[in-house]
Image (cartoon, grey):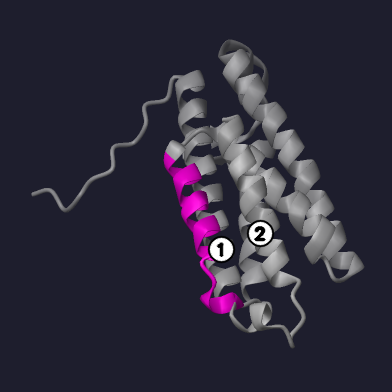
Amino acid sequence: MAGLIDECLLHLSRDLEAKTQTPESPQYKNQEKSARPRHTLIFLRRVAQTRDIHVLLDVERLALEHTLKYDTNSPEEKQSVTVALDQLDTCRKCFDSLMNNPAGYRENVDPTYSSKAREAGLPLDAAKEFFKSHATRLTNNLVSKASHVEKLLLRQRKENVAVMRECYAELQQKALGIASPKKSKGLSR
């Protein structure tokens, strides 16, 4: 896991270096053609394929910290990223609680959610709220004046959030003893 995190830091710092070039510099003009952001994109895809929620959360935390430090242009953006980091911390606590004590989750968390606060029979807890709000946050960033490559990175991060959500739902189903729905590949007759 440490190797993936180190690789993420390396990719993010290289992307920042390319992004902070002045418009007059040749590096700036070649940024869209640069392989660096593509390497980051490939890396983010590899992280999603691990389906390891710890790695996914750690990489998203690094991306958010990177955004907070280098890419926020207004107090509103800074506040949004700060909220995302707080929600991510809460999500990690929910995940750790679910992993370390599934029986406790079943006894203490499950009964506190009404039928309206459920999705597919699973509680919409703080972790699921993070997944929803962060996916929305990333979608909102897609409509900004980001470059094509930056938009590809945002889309991949959004896909990684979807993977986290799936992994978390699987853990919830296991803890609550709910059978996971089978995905059909077509119409049955």
Residue found farthest to the left: 189
Q: Are marks 2 and 1 in contact (CB under 8 Å)?
A: yes
Q: Quarter of the image holding residue 74?
A: bottom right
The kind of residue on which mark 2 rests is Arg
147 relative position to 66: left or right: left
167 relative position to 94: left or right: left
Q: Nearer the viewer, residue 162 or 31?
A: 31
Q: Residue at x 61, y 13 (%)?
A: 101
Report if residue 164 lies within the magenta region.
no
- For the N terminus, the image quarter is top right
Q: Quarter of the image holding residue 100?
A: top right
Q: Which residue is mark 1?
A: 36
Give the image location of residue 182, x and y in percent: 28, 37
- In the rendered image, the vertical position of residue 8 relative to residue 3, given as above or below: below
Give the image location of residue 131, x and y in percent: 62, 47
Q: Which residue is mark 2?
A: 14
Pointer 2: residues within 10 angstroms few (<14), some, or many (20+)? some
Q: Between marks 2 and 1, how big is the CA–CA gap? A: 7 Å
Circle 1 — which element?
helix
- In the rendered image, the vertical position of residue 49 relative to residue 72, given as above or below: above
Q: Residue at x 62, y 19 (%)?
A: 105
Question: Which segment did they paint magenta?
Answer: 31-49
Query: Can residue 123 be spotted in the picture?
Result: no
The kind of residue on which mark 1 rests is Arg
